[in-house]
Amino acid sequence: MQRHYHPAASFLGKALRYSIVLIVIIALNFLIPRVMPGDPVKNILGEQAYYTAEDVAALSAELGLDKPVYQQFGDYLGGLFSGDWGYSYLYMQPVLEAVGGHLLWTLVLILPAIILGALLAGLAGLVAGYFRKTPLDIGLTSGFMLVYAMPHYWIAMLMLMFFSFNLGWFPMGKVTTGGLSGFAYFADLLWHMALPLLVITLFKAAYDFLIMRNTVISICGEDYILMARAKGLGRGWILFKHILRNSLAPLVTVTAIQFGMLFSGVLLVETVFSWPGMGTLIYEAIGARDYPLIQGAFLIIAVCVLLANMTADLLYRRLDPRTA
Amino acid sequence: MNILKKLTANKLLFFGVVLLGIFVLSAVFAPLISPHDPWTYGQAFLHPSAQHLLGTNDVGQDIFSELVYSARVSLWVGFVSASLATLLGVAVGIWAGFRRGWLDNVLMGMADIFLVIPALPLVILLSVYLGPSIWNIILVIALTLWPGTARVIRSQVITIRQSGYVESARIMGASEFRLMWRHVLPNVLPLVAAKFILAVAVALLLEASMSFLGLGDPSQKSWGMMLHYAFSRGGFVQNLYWWYLPPGLCITLCILGLTFINMSFEDRTDPRLQRILDR
Amino acid sequence: MKNLLVVSNLHVYFETPAGLVRANNGLNLHLEEGCNLGIMGESGCGKTVLVYTLLGLQQPGKIITGSILFSGRELVNLPEAELNHIRGRQIALIPQNQSTALNPLLKVGEQIGEVCVNLNRPDIRLEGARKLLSDLGLGDIHSVEHILKSYPHQLSGGMRQRVLTAMALLSEPDLLVADEPTTALDANTRTTTLNILKEASKRTSLLVISHDLPALKTLCPKLGVMYAGRIVEYGDTLSLMSNPLHPYSRLLMKCQQAGDYLDIPLTGFESRDLLGDNEGCSFAPFCPQATGICFKELPPEVCLDNSRVVCHLYTQSGMKLC
């Protein structure tokens, strides 16, 4: 858990760093199938692709495996930017299409979860840190620690079992019961979203709560809070105008930095709920050993995480005037 | 005796060690504790009974025995990956923090890259190609965990390095290695311990996640693998909660234990919290 | 002269892993209205604890007995709500550390403004603050405006000092407590700060805690010397400085005059000496004039003309006890 986040000196420096990371990720994606043990054709096309021994030579030529490495990389880059991310034999679609479609569903879950989770963690952390060591704090901290310790997909399984199977309050998974449109569709979607959203929100809040609480405790010990009390300001005023305000920057930063972990968690939860997002895509791709699909997924996820980090940097600049 | 006293004084540490200890003992004494051999096939989907405390899975293996034996693999992977990651992270962190200059930039650049790349997707990508052996899993997890430790250790080393006595030792002509080994390392150890515990927890969860997705080693039994089978082989849809509840519970309790231990360290290593305790 | 502040037999103890620390151990002082009081002492003598106890800002769990009468009102054990009403209005604080006393994420103007809002007095507006800042030497209205729109880290130490002083003076407090106002300042800023405080003392009574003797000489007609949680000597600043009565005061004055070269033994007193039950005088182990009784009995407070001393040396020959 990070306590101090030190943004780089200049925006340009940051942009450069992120570009380098992006290039490394793309390079990794390019290299891995080509250096891994096994048949490179199979490594690139995936195990779903069907071809005979005679095809191998032709395929190799087509994939450019006989060309020098830098040329292959150039072709690869070109392919990426022109939308050719390979073909998924599992879904019988170009990879970009398959990934894009699934990404949308994942975002539908992740974005509201981030906001709700941050709200929950922020408020709970504020209260717990301010009322340190009281029963309220102990209760909240224990609760969130418990959630933090549970594997996400296990919570998902528990919720599904309890609320769907046993109580029948929520549907068993998937996105929609089909055949609806307009407002009814939207309402049905929300109904299906409720449980997975709850699970993701809970474990995101659990991550952030502990950090928020620690931040609040640190802030409470700062000289300017003591000074605020010496000025005779009211407790509520100090809590919201000073403590909350000063803990926003670390909270936002943590949210963005933990985005990668959050995404990973979401993948697992989606699998349990049969939610047609990236999680299900990866699950099925792993089962079928459809490498192009996995690669495409990895690339998209890494880019999303990069974007989240960049957003964190920008937001931090706005929230902490010392970095401007 | 002193250790025992320290342990009981700090309740958090005590509970953490106890919790973790239960599973470590289970792992070590697995053959003694488990009533059956977890690999023997039998009648599938049996409900809990005196014969099979937690029933049987989809191929008739005794779930309770599986649970006990899984402690071995799960904890083994957790500890070994964390150890590797910590060793690597500490080595890099000390080296970079000490030498500074271009070496520092390069190493930290690498660390940053690995930090940003999300762990699970990277793990998935590598495992898919490398195949499902335990050592592959361990290596891959270690690869994703080392940067976190490296960064933190490096910051600490830089602070220590600027402290008076290190400078005086250096002026007196101590060799670099000696400086690193004798002076820097002991001061960094508490932080290393905390980071190590954290790494074990993360490694545990990563292994569980990987196995759940089907990337685990089918020749081994781990809690994650149990959950994988429970989910994909009908344990879930048939509501066989004695199958999918216990492994998750074990993981949860281990992580809780580790978290408790870590929290008991934090109260001592965090200077800001210390300031408040002083007021 | 009416007494604005009377502290009687104040004991502030707190439990630490190392034992019971008696930060204030039977402390007596009084401050008359319109008359500034300085308190002089080394680090660790309990000065800061005194300041925060006066403001009621101690953590709960600190054991506080004794009496603090402010304008005749008892502050010890006063409910928090009422204490909070007195803080920032009747008693104001200029803190020691001007670099950390302001919230780094809020503009200076906002932080001054919240004092105005909190005071709920229509006669004090931001206008008053601007004028105050100007009076304190921050320049004309335009410069002041610019400062109000800045963040604390964009201002110099001297400017922050003025801002903090203005915040304290805004409410026209009866008592202004300045905690180590000149510590760690360069000569220029120190002079500026002393001028600010002189300006401030026109509007209120000052209680200045410091170990900067020349500063105390400038600002405060009355002086108290603090050692191990007690005021061991109290009197007119000038007469105390020229003719210190208590052995510790004598040592202090000697140190001040000796300048760089000290041929006097250092007291070696540290805050951990506040631990334990010292039967006798806390200074006895270091006192060049200690006698047997000093180690056995706590010395009483003795009243001389305008001064008070807490020392066995003065208990003979019919001196009055306070």
Image (cartoon, coloured by chain):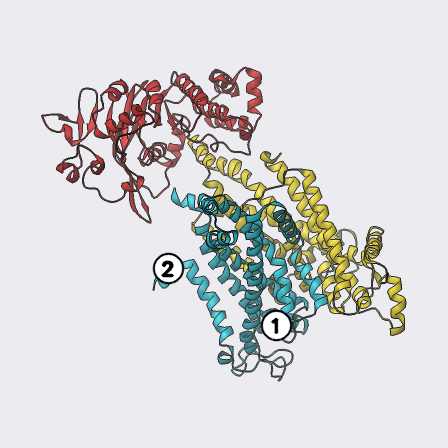
Give the colour chain B carries in the figure: cyan
Asked if the residue under mark 2 is in contact with the one under mark 1, i.e. CB atoms within 8 Å, the reply is no
**Left or right: where C301 falls relative to A218:** left
> SS for tag 2?
helix
The residue singled out by tag 1 in the image is: B226
Residue C245 coordinates in the image, percent (x, y)? 20, 25
Identify the image quadrant of residue B118: bottom right
User: Which subunit holds the residue at mark 2?
Assistant: B
- Nearest the viewer among C33 and B195 is B195
How packed mark 1 is, by other alpha carbons closer than 10 Å (few <14, some 14-19, many 20 or more), is many
Q: Quadrant of the C terminus of chain B?
A: top left
Say which amino acid is labelled 1.
Met
> What color is chain A drawn in?
yellow
Amino acid carrying mark 2 in the image? Lys
The answer to which quarter of the image holds residue A109 is bottom right
- Percent x, y of residue C143: 56, 18
Which chain is tinted red? C
Residue C117 is situated, as x and y percent measured from the top left of the image, at: 50, 27
Return the x and y of residue C138 as percentages of the image width and height. Answer: 51, 18
Mark seen at residue B6: 2
